[in-house]
Image (tube, grey):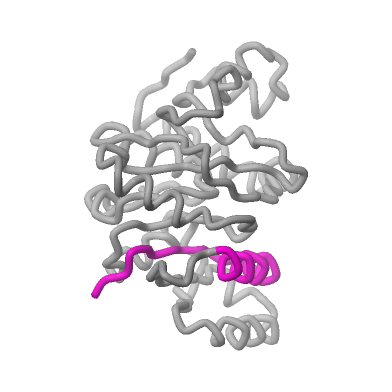
Amino acid sequence: MSNKLSICIVAYNNYNDIKEALVSLEKYTSCRLKKKIYIVDNGANISNPRDVEDFKKFISEYKEIEYYNPGDNIGFGGGHNFILDKIDSDYHAIINPDIIFCEDAFSKIINWMDNNKDVGMAIPLIVDEDGKRQDVYRLELTVFDMFNRMFLNSAFQKRANKHIMKNMDYSTPFQVPFGQGSFLVIRTSLFKELSGFDERFFMYVEDADLCKRLNQISKLLYYPYAKVIHKWEKGSHKNKVLFKYHIQSMIYYFKKWGWKLI
């Protein structure tokens, strides 16, 4: 019998975050939900060996977890695709290591998607640790919106608010062109049909690409009745190497989909 849900977390030297995510997931997720959790460790070869062994010992207590070391950092999309041929679930969850559960979000989302067959992927209400909704629901990327956000610190505030769908009614479901990849639940059959993430994005913007491709054949909807907490460290805003990856991914995205200026 296949699992109702598969979950993938890509690790990179952030074992404490993942431990917290797993503890909260087990605390709040119904034991009746048959699931399998995959952890793909992109940072195993650069992490402290003692930390790696301690983490593997921690997750060995969870019979539903499978741990994989791909041998190198194969990127965010590559990490998630690493288990693509292993999953046989009805639904697949893409979640970041810094997600914290505060309720049984998975059961709520899956029950809703079971009853709404036109929904191919769902993104819940994602809040910060203070309970404030995060700006993870966006329109399709344009050159101007990315430049405004990355280089102008959203100086064109009215335009920035439009891009992050600030004026939508967040008390009811609606279609989302681009939902940030910190927490997405997709029908596994569609994830496989799309061949997962485009691995030519090493880091960043691969979620925008996946959402665009998904919305061409189905729908990504915001689901307000399930909530998760996202610590969201925004690494590319602080690290020059990550910022470089972000820029490279944006360039590839626009080369792939066209240079939509505004």
Q: Is residue 204 magenta?
A: no
Number of numbered markers: 0
Q: Is residue 23 magenta?
A: yes
Q: Where does the image place residue 13, in percent across and percent down from the top left? A: 65, 68
| Residue at horizontal 50 percent and vertical 34 percent from the top | 250
Q: Where does the image place residue 195, in percent across and percent down from the top left? A: 27, 52
86, above or below 128, in the image: below
Of the pair 171 and 38, the residue shown nearer to us: 171
Where residue 158 sits, quadrant-wise, is top right
Q: Where does the image place residue 70, in percent across and percent down from the top left? A: 45, 73
Which stretch appears magenta? 1-28
Of the pair 116 and 46, the residue shown nearer to us: 116
Left or right: where 255 falls relative to 115: right
Left or right: where 167 falls relative to 222: right
Of the pair 85 and 237, the residue shown nearer to us: 85
- Say whether residue 16 is visible: yes
- Say whether residue 199 is visible: no
* Quadrant in which the N terminus appears: bottom left
| Residue at horizontal 50 percent and vertical 46 percent from the top | 181
